Image (cartoon, coloured by chain):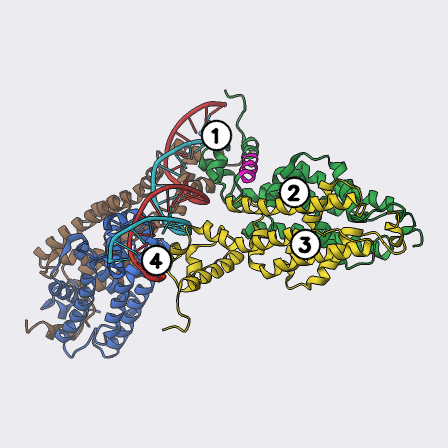
Chain colours: A brown, B blue, C green, D yellow, E red, F cyan
Amino acid sequence: MSVIKRNKENTEAALLAAAVQTFQEVGYAKARVSDIVGRCGLSQGTFYLYFKSKEDILRRVLRDFMEQMNQALDDVDNIFDGQTSREVRASLSAFLEKVLLVHQRNLGPAEILWREGFGHGGVFAELHAEIYAYFLEIVQARMAEAVGKGLIRDENIEDASVFLISLFERSSFYFMIVKGAPDIPRLAASMARFILHGLLPESKAQPGNHQGK
Amino acid sequence: MSVIKRNKENTEAALLAAAVQTFQEVGYAKARVSDIVGRCGLSQGTFYLYFKSKEDILRRVLRDFMEQMNQALDDVDNIFDGQTSREVRASLSAFLEKVLLVHQRNLGPAEILWREGFGHGGVFAELHAEIYAYFLEIVQARMAEAVGKGLIRDENIEDASVFLISLFERSSFYFMIVKGAPDIPRLAASMARFILHGLLPESKAQPGNHQGK
Amino acid sequence: MSVIKRNKENTEAALLAAAVQTFQEVGYAKARVSDIVGRCGLSQGTFYLYFKSKEDILRRVLRDFMEQMNQALDDVDNIFDGQTSREVRASLSAFLEKVLLVHQRNLGPAEILWREGFGHGGVFAELHAEIYAYFLEIVQARMAEAVGKGLIRDENIEDASVFLISLFERSSFYFMIVKGAPDIPRLAASMARFILHGLLPESKAQPGNHQGK
Amino acid sequence: MSVIKRNKENTEAALLAAAVQTFQEVGYAKARVSDIVGRCGLSQGTFYLYFKSKEDILRRVLRDFMEQMNQALDDVDNIFDGQTSREVRASLSAFLEKVLLVHQRNLGPAEILWREGFGHGGVFAELHAEIYAYFLEIVQARMAEAVGKGLIRDENIEDASVFLISLFERSSFYFMIVKGAPDIPRLAASMARFILHGLLPESKAQPGNHQGK
DNA sequence: TATGAATGAGATTTCATTCAT
DNA sequence: AATGAATGAAATCTCATTCAT
């Protein structure tokens, strides 16, 4: 008799955890239902008591992460906020940090979604497009406001928001998953600085740079 | 006598083209050899006269693109070059334009590689990692030089190069494949500006920005 | 509720039996997995629940027979034993009978192994070589002892043991499989006589044979 | 322009030789037509100018050998002939030597036929059965005569002839193909002795053996 | 006489899913 | 709630054979 009594939530949670691990390790396409149940010591039949299909468990796996992301994005009203460039940077950094934390708390699902992100598999195309579009929308809206207030440069907003999200998505994937265990505040700050100031030296250089324009 | 004479190059080219289309449309995993030959009006057996396996044709499809990318990266000695910020921007923009053009000329293969890029499939893991690593290496090296010359900000070079490449890879994917048919020089210029100056207003803003530091 | 309850051993045994029959009838190479499952009224997929591959089921089919052969050969310490020629013959005959019985009890596997025996197929080459070598080793060792004791003629032992085994293997194949259902003791006796005395008339000559020694 | 001019016989002979080698190396079933033509530098199409099918070339490969065997068997009227046991042995030895020489002169085809001998492949079943039956018939007939004349023991002739041929077939396979390059006269003598005298010591006994005649 | 491009019928193997117990 | 045996639809790859040139 096992110490952990089997009950509904128990089993479901175990299956979800096993699915995350399996999808991380071999990817959704190659993951077999038998792998997932194998990890829990359950039989294949049991799987279908809890989930309609392999796709179903994937949606459940990603659902939480996506909800947290949506939440985090909803909360935001201050991506580019402040009076000085320093304040703007602090605000952007805070935003990035929040989103990065959501990733870190959902490392498995995040990896799964970003890895297979732009891929073709029916589910991913759909889910990734959904979250990506929402992210883009939020960023564009905030950026437009900030441009209106003169906080950030008057530039092609579509370009800029795509650049920002691309930079965020791919590089957070790189630092969190490929490299592993990043220092989130530092990473957020570094990213914010790059996004706001770019690569050019800030101090003396800037003044002269753009006058000719 | 048929209009298109059948011969070896002919058929091989037809198969390669069909493979690109098929991989673009449904992804490598779901693409069936029968889809590929179906497009050419050939039989399954014929496929194996030209390619050892489905993986083989994929490698052939990507090979050209990867060679052109390597070439473009090799040629580069001036990513961040110039006396003034304007010149540096022109040099970066030229580099980005060159690489974007390689993508545009190989839109199919590029889509295939970036789509499945960070995925799990054996071939892609390998090929994508290869090109990604090379790209990273080049950018890091040039960045280090440029920092040495005081051309760009003295910042964490690993961060910055990952940001740069992430931004480039994901957003060029977005503009070229999701949106389609971009104006390359404009895109390159926009990207270069973002990379160098970030989002903050350049003119009056910058001087005051960092004084407090 | 069906009369024959389906369970693991049941199905496995059915598949093994069907495989033996199929291999006997059409040979290993031409036997299709679909033939085997067809005989049991099972589906193709089921086959792979029980066996890793077609080769796997073949090994399982032959394993028992080979183990019994090894056992029979291990037990033997008296192939050529006795004081008089009659006793030697009795001992040889008993040995042959024992080995023939192993064949008779495993007629299917034996047929499969001997039929494809010296062939090229990977598995057979391996398994047949193994059992053949062991058979040869045993016979040579016992023959050497018997020559030492003067029980049998001082002859080239390699020749003689190859002759003996060849005679046994091919002719038991002939009598058991081509002709079918032989009288084993009679066959063993006949074979022993041939092996010991050859074809020449023995009549008066033999009595003196072994006395001196 | 090659030194060896291509002509009909030439090409056919080349294909036959290549087929023998290929069949020897990988067996008939696994041998591919492309292997055979590959060895000759010919194309697959050419193969079918000379042979109706893969089976056809196999028959042609074996035909010569089988004719020589038939010839050798036809010639024989003296397998067990002579007044003394020594003479009988000489006659048997001569016969065996003759047949062994046919094998040696047709080592490739012989290997192919004996290897796949009792196998299931349509052709072999047929061809091997044919030659085997003829061999058996000849031996039985001569044996019956010899028994009639009191030259050899009055024994079950079917048994004895099967023993003899089995011994011959398998052990010549062993010595010629597995071991390679045997001393034919020695082997024939050794085999004849085993067949006539068996394993028991002959020493003093034999002289008296046939006097009673 | 020779080529070589093309064929297409199969064969093995995988795995998500079902369902009676 | 759980099992586990069974399914069957694919998908990749092989190779003897054909045939227009």
User: Mark 4 against mark 1, which lies toward the viewer?
Assistant: 1
Which quarter of the figure is the N terminus of chain D placed in? bottom left
User: Mark 1 against mark 3, which lies toward the viewer?
Assistant: 3
Q: Dot 3: within a 10 Å radius of its alpha carbon, few (fewer than 14), some, or many (20 or more) residues? A: many
User: Mark 2 against mark 4, which lies toward the viewer?
Assistant: 2
Front-lying residue, B32 or C170: C170
Which segment did they paint magenta?
A: C15-25
Horizontal side of A125 relative to A83 (left or right) equals right
Front-lying residue, D116 or C101: D116
Badge 2 element: helix
Residue C30 seen in the figure: yes
> Gap in Å between the C-alphas at discs 1 and 2?
31 Å
Which numbered tag is attached to residue D171? 3
Badge 4 element: helix
> Gap in Å between the C-alphas at discs 2 and 3?
15 Å
Q: What residue would you read off at disc 4?
A: B56
Q: Position of residue B79 (x, y in %)?
A: 21, 73
Q: Position of residue C71 (x, y in %)?
A: 72, 44
Q: What residue would you read off at disc 1?
A: C41
Q: What residue would you read off at disc 2?
A: C173
> Gap in Å between the C-alphas at discs 4 and 1?
39 Å
Contact, mark 2 vs mark 3 (Cβ under 8 Å): no
Asked if labels 4 and 1 share a chain, the reply is no
Q: Dot 2: within a 10 Å radius of its alpha carbon, few (fewer than 14), some, or many (20 or more) residues? A: many
For badge 2, the amino acid type reads: Phe
For badge 4, the amino acid type reads: Asp
Please name the predominant secondary structure of the magenta segment in the image.
Answer: helix
Query: On what subunit does the disc labeled 1 rest?
Result: C
User: Mark 1 against mark 2, which lies toward the viewer?
Assistant: 2
For badge 3, the amino acid type reads: Ser
